[in-house]
Image: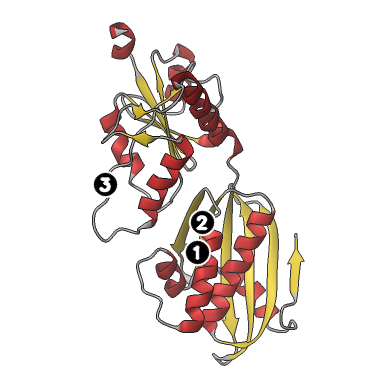
Amino acid sequence: MLGEDKNAFFVVRKGDIVGVYKNLNDCQPQLGSSLCDPPVSVYKGYAMPKEAEEYMISCGLKNALYSIKAADLTQELFGNLVACPFQQPHFALGEPSSDHMSKRRFQEVLGSQTSDGFGSASMTGDPARKQAKLEHLATQALTTNRTCILEFDGASKGNPGPAGAGAVLRTEDGNLVCRLREGLGITTNNVAEYRAMILGLRYALSKGFTSIRVLGDSKLVCMQVQGLWKVKNQNISKLYEEAKKLKDKFVCFQIDHVLRDLNSDADTQANLAVDLAVGQIQEVDS
């Protein structure tokens, strides 16, 4: 076992990035470096297959740290891996509380309490059965993740005035899934922005996507959903709570603010939606 431990390596899956490390301490940056909030999966191998190392070198990846897209990960690439339970690192004050939710959700998936820092989990009941369940869940997490990109925008002619919500859903590699627009009647621009995001989140969930990256040019919406700005307006507060409930249904959720000129497709849908009846939704797949 000493010889095996000397050649041990750790495979870390967070969202759509897979990192390979020589020791557990090196995993820390990947575990806490993103606003994305997926549960993290850690696996341990005892001798990296030569084919795996040659594959990563061919991709320009070498030395102690590797990273590859999850889509390139095959079950055979790293040989035999075992799930490696851990506790996520503590986060500095001021960071979004969703990181702590991620830690709790991962512990719930494991069905056990982890020890302080990295290391073995404290298992209750039949250890063999618990380990088999853990490995099954870890493997399932690697194979069932579906990722999409949501672009959203709201329009209000008068603020408040006739308003519409627009959303564009794409696959992870940028291919169009559909364009959505909804008539909102008379309302404000901020309400329209929230309604646009909610429209897209609902659709993504209905299509079975489990991970999502949300892009919008409303700084207010992006900062509030990240937990960095407080929600003070009562009307906005209701929409925020609805968006939060939808957000929590995804395994991985990330939202980023983009400039208006990078959000033109969603903007077009929002402006077209202004002419729709209240509550009318149109879906365009091309």
Could you tell me which secondary element the residue under label 3 belongs to?
loop
Tell me the kind of residue under disc 2.
Asp
User: In the figure, residue 189 lies in which quadrant?
Assistant: bottom right
Question: Cα distance, mark 1 to mark 2?
Answer: 6 Å
Q: Residue furthest left?
A: 93
| Residue receiving disc 3 | 90
Q: Establish if 204 lies above or below 282.
A: above
Could you tell me which secondary element the residue under label 2 belongs to?
loop
Q: Are marks 1 and 2 in contact (CB under 8 Å)?
A: yes
Could you tell me which secondary element the residue under label 1 belongs to?
helix
Q: Residue at x 53, y 66 (%)?
A: 243
Q: Are marks 3 and 1 in contact (CB under 8 Å)?
A: no
Q: Residue at x 60, y 44 (%)?
A: 146
Tell me the kind of residue under disc 3.
His
Question: Cα distance, mark 2 to mark 3?
Answer: 21 Å
Q: Establish if 178 lies above or below 272.
A: above
Answer with mark 2 or mark 3, whichever residue precedes in sequence: 3
Residue 264 seen by the camera: no
Does 181 sit left or right of 228 as displayed?
Answer: right
| Residue receiving disc 1 | 244
User: In the figure, residue 83 lies in which quadrant?
Assistant: top left
The label number, if any, that marks residue 248 in the structure image: 2
Local crowd size for mark 3, using a 10 Å CA cut-off: few (<14), some (14–19), many (≥20): few
Q: Residue at x 40, y 46 (%)?
A: 104
Answer with mark 3 or mark 1, whichever residue precedes in sequence: 3
Tell me the kind of residue under disc 1.
Lys
On the image, the x and y values in percent for residue 268 come to: 64, 74
